[in-house]
Image: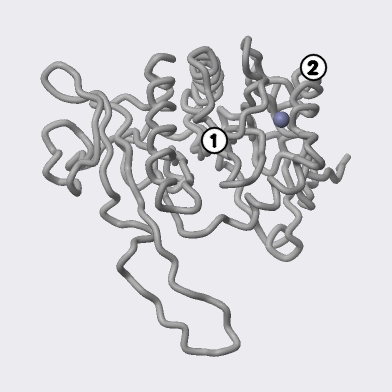
Amino acid sequence: MSQIRKDYILDRWVIVSKGRMNRPYEFKHKQQKHQGTDFFAPGNEGLTPPEIGRIPKKGGWLMRWFPNKFPVVNDKRGLNIDTPMLIGETVKGEHEIIAETDSDKQLHELPVEHISQLLKIYASRIAELSREWSYVSVFKNHGPQAGTSIVHSHSQVVAIDRTPPEILELANKSVVKGECKFCEILKTESKTKRRIGTAKTAVAFAPYASRYHYEAVIFPKRHVKSILEYTEEEYIDTALLIKKIIGKLGGAGISYNMYLNYAPKGKNLHFHITFTPREATFAGFELSTGIIVNSVPPEDAAAWYRE
Ligand SMILES: [Zn+2]
């Protein structure tokens, strides 16, 4: 039986159609291995653009960040729009890499405290880049189907000169007359079959209208607009839930993206982190209608995470 479901906030629809059950072990990939040079490893610092910052540790570093050699945006390259009826202009920004560890471990194999420390680096990069740019996207691509070209565990930060329309829409529609819909949603979902896990200050669940197999979100229980407002306890609790989610995904060899959603400048949006595992491919129906078909019901996805 198929069901069509609307996103909590956006006018975005998903058909949940429990088809051939895609059990994670059926699409398990081989663990990626470095081939040739590990550009982000200790000893190869000279192979990256000049460092922006690091967390030092005895004899080296624990994490370090630097500009991306192949940025999606930069403040130099321009693009000429030569046809008057078309809308477009030069987009400016900065693109950074955060090498998450000096080891060859992946993030899901590192301790909760390490993940918490990475979240603090995210916060500091957002704080710094927000001084100059309108919006700072923070994300992680893990595995070949999520767009990773380098195996060494890393996150990316892209600052751009405008706020993405979908983020604005999410902010404008989720907080109406000072009332946050997500505050209510997270309270409800943490008790449904879609719950994944709960910590004292944060909850994780599979979104009702998940677009991706095993999609997951983490919300702090407290309404904060950004990770910059996090307390020590919120950092640890969120890291704990991240570890639970990416531990399952990473352990099953599933590629995923993880990204932060937060309030753009002057707007209100309940901060959260989204996980989009990338096993399913959007095909003709999705592309022709904009409606996504998801063959793994979020209720089953949540049960898998809770196992
Ligand atoms: Zn809220």
Give residue 110's quadrant in the image: top left
The Cα–Cα distance between marks 1 and 2, rounded to whole angstroms, is 30 Å
Q: Residue at x 47, y 41 (%)?
A: 139
Residue of label 2: 191
Q: Which residue carries the number 1 mark?
A: 27
Is 98 or 175 nearer to us in this picture?
A: 175
Task: Give the quarter of the figure containing the C terminus.
Answer: top right
Provide residue 216's location: percent of width, then percent of height.
63, 31
Q: Amino acid at mark 2?
A: Lys
Whether residue 75 is visible here, answered yes or no, is: yes
Identify which residue is drawn at 37% across, 18% down: 114
Given the image, on which type of amino acid does mark 1 rest? Phe
Q: Depth check: 174 or 2 in front?
A: 174
Classify mark 1: helix, strand or loop. Answer: helix
Q: Residues within 10 Å of mark 2 (few under 14, many from 20)?
A: few
Q: Position of residue 166 (x, y in %)?
A: 65, 54
- Which quarter is ligand 1 in? top right
Whether residue 103 is visible, yes or no, is no
Please name whichever residue, 206 or 49, is drawn nearer the observer in this view of the structure: 49
- The label number, if any, that marks residue 207 in the structure image: none
